[in-house]
Amino acid sequence: MTVPPIAMLAELTYRCPLSCPYCSNPIEMAQQDQELETATWADVFRQAADLGVLQLHLSGGEPASRRDLTELVHAARTAGLYTNLITSGIGLSQKRLAELDEAGLDHIQLSLQGTDAGMADMIGGYRGGFDRKMKVAGWIAEIGFPLTLNAVLHRKNLHQLPRAIEMAVEMGARRIEVATVQFHGWALQNRDALMPTKEQAKEATRIVAEARVALKGKLVIDYVPADYHSDYPKRCMGGWGTTGLNVAPDGLVLPCHAAQSIPHLEFESVRYRRLRDIWYDSAAFNAYRGTDWMADPCKSCERKTVDFGGCRCQAMALLGDANATDPVCVKSPHHGRLQDQAAAHASAEAELVYRSAPAKAP
Amino acid sequence: MDPSSIPALPRGVRLHFDKIRDTWVLLAPERAVTLDAIGHAVLSEVDGRRSFAEITASLAEKYSAPQAQIADDSEGFLTALRNRRFLDVSP
């Protein structure tokens, strides 16, 4: 039986001052003039609350690139949603943060590209970004917003993990997400530059385990391990169409932010259909719901409702078949090849391919 | 938890009645915790002023149950919330 979603990711815009080479936005980005208007978003937030969404994540791109961000936060809170801003900090001033506080913003998740300006600005492709982010972190603490630091890690900066955890404590964050890059979107093109080594992945797991003990009750650590080096795939999105949904800047409703990489799926827009109908009745949301779509080895696997066969977009990207078992899984016939591939990427050298900006209106 | 400790919901953590699922939930940064009747009763008493002992005494009276049992039942729950940073406890 289909249950209501708990979380919605609203990608307000694909515009962003940074150009991180692992950006989760699609390679083909919608044009700026197709972004949903303020009133449409406000209506979508009400529809989401009526559908059962509790948590709203305002993301992008950089959500602060929307001039109406404060209005959008206000609309979300009025709809009764817990409102989380996922930001690099660029575009937030002290004044704007005070306005967001006034509008009822519940929580901020601040991304971290590196623990010093050299690393962070190189990865973000934006000079001065790190210094600005540190200023913003100070203002966030002054206002007292609950803060999660989101450290995105890969081969070039995994050695900075201990410092990232220290920084989270110094900033007064209650939580840090230690997120090893997942290879979708732009990151897929940067595997030779960003794939961590197996040793780095192990070391990160050890550091996280130790820090969890040392910082118990002080800092919560959520950890996304390097999945090419894992034996079981991630429970992507908590299961397709079970927990969360994603609304792209132009209003397309997606089961996950990468779903447009599965070419045979057709997505519907909040401009033309109610969110409820899209969640319950659309072909894209029903495509990989539950376990009926599975073939072996998933079909007969005791873990099939633990990880739902892993990530559909990854199966598509790596095997050309979105119905296949995620090759991260040891039971996949392609697992050995993926491990070899991961080792090859991890020992390769390549220039970073930076994310490019969305197309301007013609 | 020490009887004299004062629990409080920190900023960004709040009780919310989920009309769609007909249940109380605790909303926290990027998490929603479904509350059973006991969890909701305990958190409804948490006001950032009264101690753990005062809270369990109030619940004992309200539900005609032994205070020690209520303290036992709620301590694990509150400690788990504290470890997830969904609850502040002072001192």
Image (spheres, coloured by chain):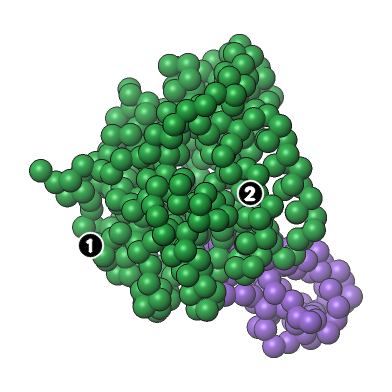
Chain colours: A green, B purple
- Say what amino acid the circle numbered 2 marks: Gln
Please indicate, yes or no, whether residue B35 appears anywhere in the rendered image: no
CA distance for labels 1 and 2: 42 Å
- Between A38 and A169, which is closer to the camera in this rendering? A169
Tag 2 residue: A160
How packed mark 1 is, by other alpha carbons closer than 10 Å (few <14, some 14-19, many 20 or more), is few
Q: How many marks?
A: 2
- Between A324 and B41, which is closer to the camera in this rendering? A324
Query: In the picture provided, is A135 more to the left or to the right than B60?
Result: left
Q: From the viewer's perspective, is the residue at label 1 or at label 2 nearer?
A: 2
Which residue is at 50% across, 66% downward? A134
The mark nearer the N terminus, 1 or 2, is 1
- Which structural element holds mark 1? helix
Which residue is at 66% across, 65% downward? A169
The furthest residue to the top: A333
Q: Chain of mark 1?
A: A
Q: Which mark is residue A319?
A: none
Are marks 1 and 2 in one subunit? yes
For the C terminus of chain A, give its image quadrant. top left
Query: Residue A315 placed where, x, y %?
Result: 49, 22
Query: Residue A336 placed where, x, y %?
Result: 64, 14
- Say what amino acid the circle numbered 1 marks: Ala
Query: In the picture provided, is B10 more to the left or to the right than A289?
Result: right
The furthest residue to the bottom: B49
In this rendering, the answer to whether B37 lies above or below A24 is: below
In this rendering, the answer to whether B26 lies above or below A227 is: below
CB contact under 8 Å: marks 1 and 2 = no
Tag 1 residue: A39
Q: Chain of mark 2?
A: A
